[in-house]
Image (cartoon, helix red, strand yellow):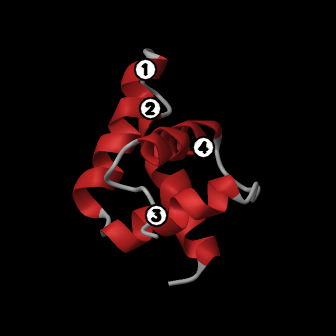
Amino acid sequence: MSEDQLIKMANDIAAFFHGETNREEAVGGVVNHIQKFWTRRMRERLVERVRAGEGGFADLALEAARRLAKSDSAAPRP
């Protein structure tokens, strides 16, 4: 799977939660979905793209990826 596909998938998830009126719940929903349904490697690659400053992320997807970067479940392996 390409990096562009990962970003598109993250943005699609964010679009689903975009209608949520509570921003914290919306971001939490994106994080929860990614943690539940994405493999560790997919999460790591997503976090790597954010850390590299890659563009193309929807606002909610970017915030979710930043939160994932802080959690052990997506921390890149040494």
Residue 74 sits above or below residue 61 on the image: below
Residue, far front = 78
Closer to the eye: label 3 or 1? 3
Packing grade of label 3 (10 A; few <14, some 14-19, many >=20) is: some
Q: Residue drawn at (32%, 64%), measured in percent from left and top?
A: 38
Distance in Å between CA atoms under marks 1 and 2: 5 Å
Residue 52: which numbered mark, if any?
none
Distance in Å between CA atoms under marks 4 and 2: 9 Å
Q: Secondary structure at mark 4?
A: helix
Q: Is residue 37 left or right of residue 61?
A: left
Discs 1, 4 touching: Cβ within 8 Å:
no
Q: Amino acid at mark 4?
A: Leu
Mark closer to the chain start, 3 or 2: 2
Q: Amino acid at mark 2?
A: Val
Residue 62: which numbered mark, if any?
4
Mark closer to the chain start, 4 or 2: 2
Discs 4, 2 touching: Cβ within 8 Å:
no
Packing grade of label 2 (10 A; few <14, some 14-19, many >=20) is: many
Q: What percent of the width, then of the height, locates residue 6? A: 53, 68
Discs 3, 2 touching: Cβ within 8 Å:
no
Q: Residue drawn at (30%, 49%), measured in percent from left and top?
A: 33
Q: Secondary structure at mark 1?
A: helix
Q: Amino acid at mark 3?
A: Pro
Q: Secondary structure at mark 2?
A: helix
Residue 45 sits above or below residue 33 on the image: below
Can you identify the residue that label 3 sits on? 76
Residue 24: which numbered mark, if any?
1
Distance in Å between CA atoms under marks 3 and 2: 21 Å
Q: Secondary structure at mark 3?
A: loop
Q: Residue drawn at (33%, 67%), measured in percent from left and top?
A: 40
